[in-house]
Image: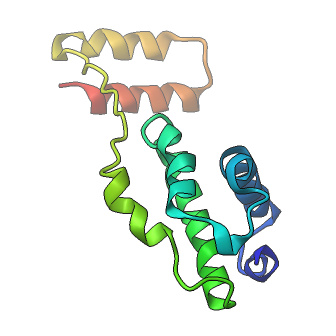
Amino acid sequence: MLEQKRDGWRGRRHHREWMASLRRHAFPRIGKVPVSEVTSADLLEILTPIRHRKASSARRVRQRLRAVLEWALAMGYRIDNPCDRIGPVLGPQHDVTEHMRALPHREVATAIRTVREAPAPEVAKLALEFLVLTAAR
């Protein structure tokens, strides 16, 4: 299956990322299970522990598992894709977003002066100045 997909990928890195995520999260649970016997319960056991803690990894693992199971469906190894049934059980996924406080307006000039006087490359100082100006409230 991966050999068929590999030609459409941009590089070897994508293949390594696919395999690393599946080795880390899926293979401990279903690595030796025939593709025809993978169940929704297996997928839930894989995804539930990382669903909110590692939200982006969970999304990628689920997409990759779905792709493998769709391939198995197309090849006649399965009659359904158990990924289709797990969404309602998993429920909505919540990425934890941590917002930073904005710089008070009265402190902007001091922050920009500090950035300009810093012993750093000019490009870095310009980037920080841009951030200070866009983050001010």
Q: Is residue 36 above or below residue 73?
A: above
In the rendered image, residue 23, in percent from the top left (x then y), is placed at 75, 50
Q: Is residue 126 above or below residue 83?
A: above
Examine the rendering and report whether any part of residue 25 can be seen.
yes
Q: Is residue 136 above or below residue 31?
A: above
In the rendered image, residue 135, in percent from the top left (x then y), is placed at 28, 28
| 57 horizontally vs 1: left or right | left
In the rendered image, residue 49, in percent from the top left (x then y), is placed at 51, 38
Q: Nearer the viewer, residue 125 or 8?
A: 8
Single out the residue that lies furthest toward the front: 37
- Visual colour scheme: rainbow
| 29 horizontally vs 86: left or right | right
Residue 2: image quadrant is: bottom right
In the rendered image, residue 85, in percent from the top left (x then y), is placed at 40, 68
Q: Quadrant of the C terminus?
A: top left
Q: Residue at x 37, y 40 (%)?
A: 95
Labels in figure, total: 0
Q: Is residue 29 above or below residue 120?
A: below
Q: Nearer the viewer, residue 74 or 19?
A: 74
| 131 horizontally vs 10: left or right | left
